[in-house]
């Protein structure tokens, strides 16, 4: 005889903050009781900065690279640049989705990427952050706290 076991934790949904993100009525949801919400925001913000630094370094290396001249319709340099750009946006979207929720960037941006998309996103989210109690002052304070030299958890 197989015994099925399960558990359900029912919580009050009054601390859920929902934002409609497109004309299809799709939403992203934030649980304001999540004690890691600020940490996730910090991780997203710093993660995208790190992805951008890595992208810029790889772009500089790519620009210095010598390529053989070919009669190819699409030069290898253009192919390599395109791959680098695609990786940047894929990594940035994945990082943002860790805070916004799985598939959030797809809901918000669809299949399109553009240079200032995350700046535009943060500008749109800032008033919502205030309503959720995620102030930039608190974010900066938490960033400093996270990266203090005596915070050994950062290195683990």
Image: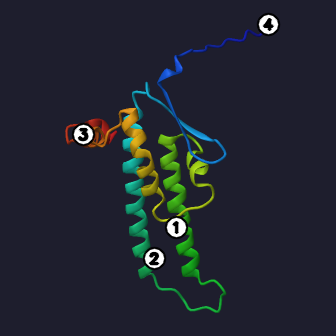
Cα distance in 3D space between marks 2 and 3: 37 Å
Instruction: State which quarter of the image contains the C terminus.
Output: top left
Disc 4 designates what residue?
1
**2 vs 4, front mark:** 2
Q: Earlier in the sequence, mark 1 or mark 3?
A: 1
Please state the horizontal and vertical placement of residue 35, each as a whole percent of the image: 39, 27
Left-right relation of 119 to 86: left
The residue mark sitting in front, 2 or 3, is 3
Q: Nearer the viewer, residue 52 or 105?
A: 105
Marks 3 and 4 sit apart, C-alpha to C-alpha, by: 56 Å
Residue carrying label 1: 85
Q: How much space separates mark 1 and mark 3, taking CA atoms? A: 32 Å
Q: Residue at x 32, y 39 (%)?
A: 135
- Say what secondary structure mark 3 lies in: helix
Marks 2/1: CA–CA distance: 12 Å
Q: Earlier in the sequence, mark 1 or mark 4?
A: 4
Separation of residues labelled 2 and 4 (CA atoms): 63 Å
Secondary structure at numbered mark 2:
helix
Residue at the location (46% across, 52% down)? Answer: 121
Badge 1: how crowded within 10 Å, few (<14), some, or many (20+)?
some
Q: Residues within 10 Å of mark 4 (few under 14, many from 20)?
A: few
- Foreground mark, 1 or 3? 3
- State the image coordinates of residue 73 (x, y, percent, origin top left): 66, 87
User: Does 88 sit above or below residue 155?
Assistant: below
Seen from this angle, which residue lies furthest top? 1
Determine the CA span between mark 1 and mark 4: 55 Å
Answer with mark 2 or mark 4, whichever residue precedes in sequence.
4
- The quadrant the N terminus occupies is top right
Front residue of 150/103: it is 103
Front-most of residues 113 and 148: 113
Tag on residue 141? 3
């Amino acid at each position: 005889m197989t015994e099925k076991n399960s558990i359900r934790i029912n919580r009050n949904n009054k601390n859920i903050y929902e934002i409609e993100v497109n004309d299809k009525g799709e939403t992203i949801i934030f649980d304001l009781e999540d004690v890691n919400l600020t940490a996730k925001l910090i991780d997203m913000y710093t993660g995208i900065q790190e992805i951008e630094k890595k992208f810029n370094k790889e772009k500089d290396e790519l620009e210095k690279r010598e390529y053989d001249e070919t009669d190819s319709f699409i030069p290898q340099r253009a192919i390599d640049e395109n791959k680098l750009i695609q990786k940047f946006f894929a990594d940035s979207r994945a990082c943002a989705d860790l805070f916004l929720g799985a598939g959030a960037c797809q809901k918000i941006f669809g299949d399109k990427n553009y240079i200032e998309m995350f700046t535009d996103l943060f500008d749109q989210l800032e008033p919502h952050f205030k309503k959720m109690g995620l102030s930039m002052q608190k974010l900066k304070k938490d960033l400093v706290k996270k990266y203090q030299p005596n915070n050994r958890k950062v290195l683990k």
